[in-house]
Image (cartoon, helix red, strand yellow):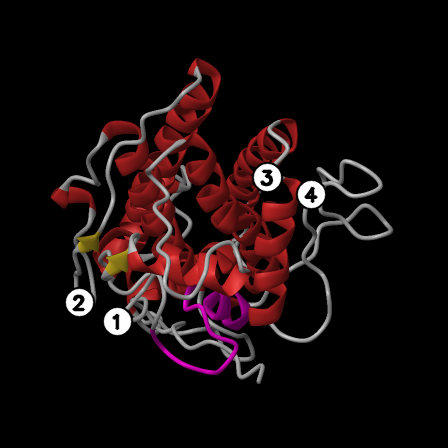
Amino acid sequence: MFGKRTIVDMIGRSAENDADRRNFLRTAGLAGLGVVGASAATTLGAGSAVAGYGPSDGAVLNFALNLEYLEAEFYSYAVFGRGLPDFITTGKGRRGGVVGGREVNFSSRAVRSYAREIAEDEINHVKFLRAALGSAKVARPQIDIRNSFTAAARAAGLIGPQQTFDPYANENNFLLAAFIFEDVGVTAYKGAAPLISNKTFLEAAAGILAVEAYHAAIIRTTLYAKGLNSQARAISDARDSLDGPGERDKGIGGSVANLVPADRNAIAFSRSAGEVLNVVYLTPEQTDRGGFFPNGVNGPINTSDDNA
């Protein structure tokens, strides 16, 4: 199934040292194939992209790990009243704390069940990516899941300039806060797909994308059922104002339910890493920090696009 050159490329693009290379072989189920000699693996450049390619698979997966840290912290606090345990937040780069977060007093059993399942999925995404990356994994950066929501709500016009938005105050606020993330996660993984050269990790990323799409569908459908269409459209418009020219993002409701944010060919759109960072940094201008990540994300992919 895998030729020698394919596996050498996979290890070289996705690992930073010999221990990481062995870890990737185990993660991909290839440890016993004996197709890569130790000397061949050792001569590969550590953590760099293969000549003629873009960022390494490791860089792309670490970018995704930053986003998964954010989602996992938000949902974990909302459901369990606590964040991620310290042992799954270590790694390369500066490890930061989490500002905000507390348990939501859900008013319906159904939404609480949805939130719990999503929380567990996001925590498992963090664990999976960390295991796949080995010692190349980045640490959880500083995360703000309090002030950033107020800034996002003000940008969307959901609240006034002097008001604050508490995503943990009630079930509806929680759903609107979750809506900020979920569609972005889907477009981020789709945008990253062409950058991943190793098919094993591309398949894994596609699996995570599918789960994020399920999550987004749950949130969108629940918002629609609750009649929160105008608020969701305002958030969608705000995301559109941050990630560059054009109107790709789609809200909820209108002449149709519009639960699936797809183009005329029923295909979801992509966001580049820079566009994703524009949204989570809460600015249309080029920067390397802000919003949900006050000190930026860890890893080589860390700067948003200049969309001004």
Left or right for 57, reference 47: right
Say the numbered circle drawn on residue 213: 3
Residue 284 sits inside the magenta stretch: yes
Query: Start and end of the magenta stretch?
Result: 274-289
Disc 3 from disc 4: Cα separation: 15 Å
Look at 35% across and 29% down and name the residue there. 120
> In the rendering, at what x and y percent does residue 22 appear?
28, 50
Look at 86% across and 50% down and name the residue there. 265
Say the numbered circle drawn on residue 71: none
Secondary structure state at the residue bearing disc 1: loop
Disc 1 from disc 4: Cα separation: 32 Å
Q: Nearer the viewer, mark 3 or mark 1?
A: 1
Q: Earlier in the sequence, mark 2 or mark 1?
A: 2
Q: Which residue is mark 2?
A: 94
> In the rendering, at what x and y percent does residue 131 appear?
29, 44
Q: Which residue is mark 1?
A: 295
